[in-house]
Every structure is written in C-alpha cells, then in structure tokens.
Amino acid sequence: MKTIKSSEIASYLFCSVCWWTERMNGVKITKAISKGEKYHNLIAENQSKARFLYVCMIIMIVVVITLIVYRFLG
C-alpha cells in the first residue's frame, strides 16, 4: 500500500483526473519544484530559531506593558 500525502488529497479534491494522471505517470521535477523544495527545507531548518525568537518577543512585550502599567499606576 502506497502512502498518500496531504497535497495529493488536495489535488484529488481539486481534480481527480489530474491526481490519477500524476499518480500513474509521475510528476516532472522542474526548476520551480526544486527551488520550492529547497525553500521548504530552509524553513524547516530555521523553524526552531523562529519559534524561540517569537517566544522572546512575546515575553518582552509582556514585560514592557507591565512596566508601563506599573509606571502609570504606581
């Protein structure tokens, strides 16, 4: 049994004939597909760094808001 990717499900829902043709004949690997694959790999590599920076940014915003509220109410 062959595994079906989520993108294949979306392709099937859009056009079942196109999905079947791709499944039987394969997909040509073009420069755009290769470039997109490299881009997605780059995003996957940097995802943990981006999540860390996002959490730091949220913490800093909470600290700044707390200091502003303390300054005006205290």
Image (cartoon, rainbow, N blue to C red):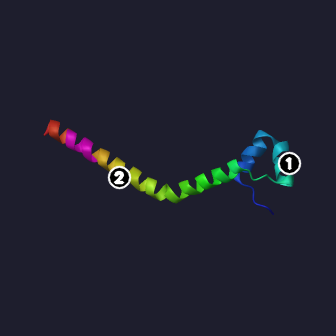
> Position of 61 compared to 14: left or right?
left
**Disc 1 secondary structure class:** helix
- Label 2 secondary element: helix
Image-quadrant location for residue 62:
top left
Image location (x, y in percent) of residue 5: 71, 54
Q: Residues within 10 Å of mark 2 (few under 14, many from 20)?
A: few
* Mark 1 lies on residue: 21
Q: Position of residue 58 (x, y in %)?
A: 35, 47
Nearest the viewer among 4 and 18 is 18
The image's mark for residue 56 is 2
Helix, strand or loop: magenta stretch: helix
Q: Which residues are magenta?
A: 63-68
Residue furthest bottom in the image: 1
Along the viewing direction, whichever of 74 and 61 lies nearer the viewer: 61
Q: CA distance from mark 1 to mark 2?
A: 47 Å
Q: Nearer the viewer, residue 50 or 1?
A: 50
Tag 2 or tag 1, which sits nearer the N-term? 1
Residue drawn at x 79%, y 52% as measured from the top left: 27
At 68% from the left and 48% from the top, the residue drawn is 32
Residues at marks 1 and 2 touching, judged by CB atoms closer than 8 Å: no
Q: In this rendering, would 11 be left or right of 52? A: right
Residue 7, position as x, y percentages in the image: 70, 49
At label 1, the amino acid type is Thr
Q: Residue furthest left?
A: 74
